[in-house]
Amino acid sequence: MKNPTTLRQSGPEFDFAADSPADVLTEVCRQGAIKMLIKSIGDEVETFVESYADLKDENGHRQVVRNGFLPEREVQTGIGQLKVKMPRVRDKSGSGIRFTSNILPPYLRRAKSIEELIPWLYLKGISTGDFAEALQALLGPDAPGLSANTVSRLKNVWKDEYEEWNRRDLSGKRYVYFWADGVYLQARMEEKQCLLVIMGADKDGNKELVGMLDGYRESEQSWMELLLDLKHRGLEMGPRLAVGDGALGFWKALAQVFGKCRRQRCWVHKTANVLNKLPKSLQEHAKSHLKEIWMAKTKSDAERAFDFFADTYQAKYPKAVQCLIKDREDLLAFYDFPAEHWVHLRTTNPIESTFATVKLRTYKTKGCLSRATGLAMAFKLCLSAEKRWRKLNRSDMMAEVIEGIKFVDGVREERIAA
């Protein structure tokens, strides 16, 4: 392989240089990726110019035309550092028509995948002093490393982004469901930190991060502060159903701020709590009995499974039975909502799975982690994870839930009558 490798076409020009020979497969992949990128941007420019083909002067000459290239700039990508010359478009009509690439926007210096990689590496335990070595191992020897000062500046940017997000206007937003949980970070903090997190499903069925605040344990006062902040920023209408574990602070605060919201206890947390009150020899069998409750097709079937569990374990293990039946109504609330949504409503798993990485990162942190940094780290990870959160099944039914249409065993009541 010859280095550097230069590819030229009728579109932009890219130069890729490697200081050390790459393996053949990697080089072939790079060449293919570069050619695809050249073609994509070339097609993007041609489409833009052709969209103004009818704009001509009195002599019939086009007013929006190609006009060489912009100054070369470097972009850091997953296949290495690319030198880019973007095509320039000239508007001779003076109308202010400008071409802006959606693939390589102006001033882009890193691909979005790299922008996500940087906080991901930090959250996974890479210290600020090891970033240069880590990026070179991932992106090749020509990848410019990031200094400890650069990473520190990035962390300050995350803090600013969180502050701005935490002041956003929520007027006009409508969330149908809430998932709430308190997440305890495991690092050597300045003080013990609990992140109070609320995820919501909007009227279109999309899940998004609604609120995040660091509080003192999961107290009623801390949850009250978070919920009232959401309301004061424009979230006038509360959700139809909130899903959470047994933290009494959240439920007490919810009743005061959004009093009409139904409650659904998380079955994962409840199962763990019940099994902890049984001997290990019985836990696997008891777990299958609990599953028969929340997997029942109808609420009446779930009620019978509830009674069976109570009758089976009451005599010898009354504490386990009491732990279950005291939240009986809240554990079965999901039956009054569309059956297509049940898989989303029975647990707080979306929050648990997202914050597993946060807990791991803070556990690996070598130095003392400040409250602001811990909160910014968690926020950055959530925004990245939010893009992959699963949309609710049959999101078209969200409007029916908002309207207050009654569902029985997951089916719309009037359909049952029909």
Image (cartoon, rainbow, N blue to C red):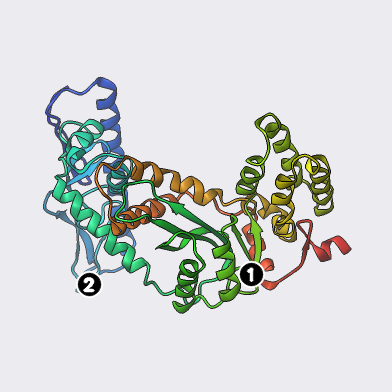
Q: Residues within 10 Å of mark 2 (few under 14, many from 20)?
A: few
Disc 2 and disc 1: Cα gap in Å? 51 Å
Rendered position, 261 above or below 325? below
Depth check, mark 2 against mark 1: the one in front is 1
Q: Which residue is pictured at 20% across the width and 40% down the height? A: 131
**For this view, does 311 lie left or right of residue 11?**
right
**For this view, does 207 lie left or right of residue 142?**
right
Rendered position, 329 above or below 147? below
Q: Position of residue 207 (x, y in %)?
A: 52, 57
Q: Is residue 222 visible?
A: yes
Q: Nearer the viewer, residue 394 or 282?
A: 282
Q: Is residue 86 visible?
A: no
Assign the C terminus to one quadrant of the image. bottom right
Q: Nearer the viewer, residue 173 or 53?
A: 173
Q: Nearer the viewer, residue 403 or 293?
A: 293
**For this view, does 346 lie left or right of residue 158?**
right
Q: Nearer the viewer, residue 371 or 354?
A: 371
Assign the N terminus to one quadrant of the image. top left
Residue that mark 1 sits on: 261
Q: Which mark is residue 36?
A: none
Label 1 secondary element: loop
Residue that mark 2 sits on: 96
Q: Position of residue 53 (x, y in %)?
A: 31, 63
Amino acid type at circle 1 is: Cys
Label 2 secondary element: loop
Q: Position of residue 139 (x, y in %)?
A: 23, 34
Rendered position, 416 above or below 138? below
Q: Marks 1 and 2: in contact by CB < 8 Å?
A: no
Amino acid type at circle 2 is: Gly
